[in-house]
Image (tube, rainbow, N blue to C red):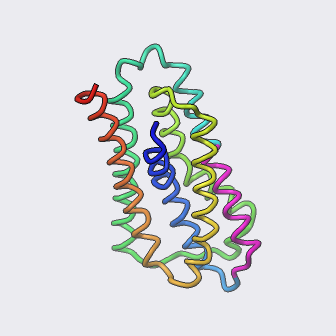
Amino acid sequence: MEFITLLLLAFGLSMDAFAVSITNGMCSSKVTKKHALITALTFGFFQALMPFLGFTLGQTFYGFISSYSHWIALILLSAIGINMIVDSIKERKQPDVCCIQNVFSAKNLVVQGIATSIDALAAGISLAVMQINIYTAALFIGTVTFLCCGLGVFIGKKFGSLLGIRAKLFGGLILILIGLKIFIESQFLK
């Protein structure tokens, strides 16, 4: 996988976590560097772990699905992207942000980290069928997510909900475009 494609995949996958980080920043009356670091570490960890788990699952069934890998990548990445776009549209129609009492609690961050990384699990399956080096990809995805989320907490405190919705929309579009790129390269550019 080309560096630019991997970078775009990492940004696309990190947008859910980035949007949640922004929301966390908006919901807290006091945002510290510790809050940003804990959020970034939690989300980065789960965004790195889930592709690895998906990759392992994909490798298990590789022989069965290898001839359909371009279709699988297109369908999975497009489904993730469409879901993110639909979520961003729903959030735009109902912009009220539901803030919980202690948004930076360990329990809350772990739940958010798992919830925002489910799409990375599906992307890991796509990485398996494309035979990508999962260690490099997972580390890269986790690092990009770490950086985005650490910044996202402070952006949320400063700019509010405007960017969170747009970040998710942008991430969804990136994932769909990556799925199309893989499909077109596989079908027409061999």
83 with respect to 9 (left or right): left
Q: Position of residue 111 (x, y in %)?
A: 64, 56
Seen from this angle, which residue lies furthest top? 63
163 with respect to 55 (left or right): left
Report the span colored magenta.
31-48
Q: Position of residue 96 (x, y in %)?
A: 45, 79
Is 56 magenta? The answer is no
Is 33 magenta? The answer is yes
Foreground residue among 29 and 152: 152
Foreground residue among 32 and 188: 188
- Secondary structure mostly seen in magenta is helix
Foreground residue among 97 and 156: 156
Seen from this angle, which residue lies furthest left? 188
* Residue at left offset 63%, top offset 36%: 135
The quarter holding residue 102 reads: bottom right
Q: Position of residue 70 (x, y in %)?
A: 34, 29
The quarter holding residue 18 reads: bottom right
43 over 28 or under it: above or below: above
Tally the numbered discs.
0
* Residue at left offset 49%, top offset 51%: 13
Q: Position of residue 113 (x, y in %)?
A: 63, 55
123 over 147 or under it: above or below: above
Which corner quadrant holds the C terminus? top left
* Residue at left offset 64%, top offset 49%: 46
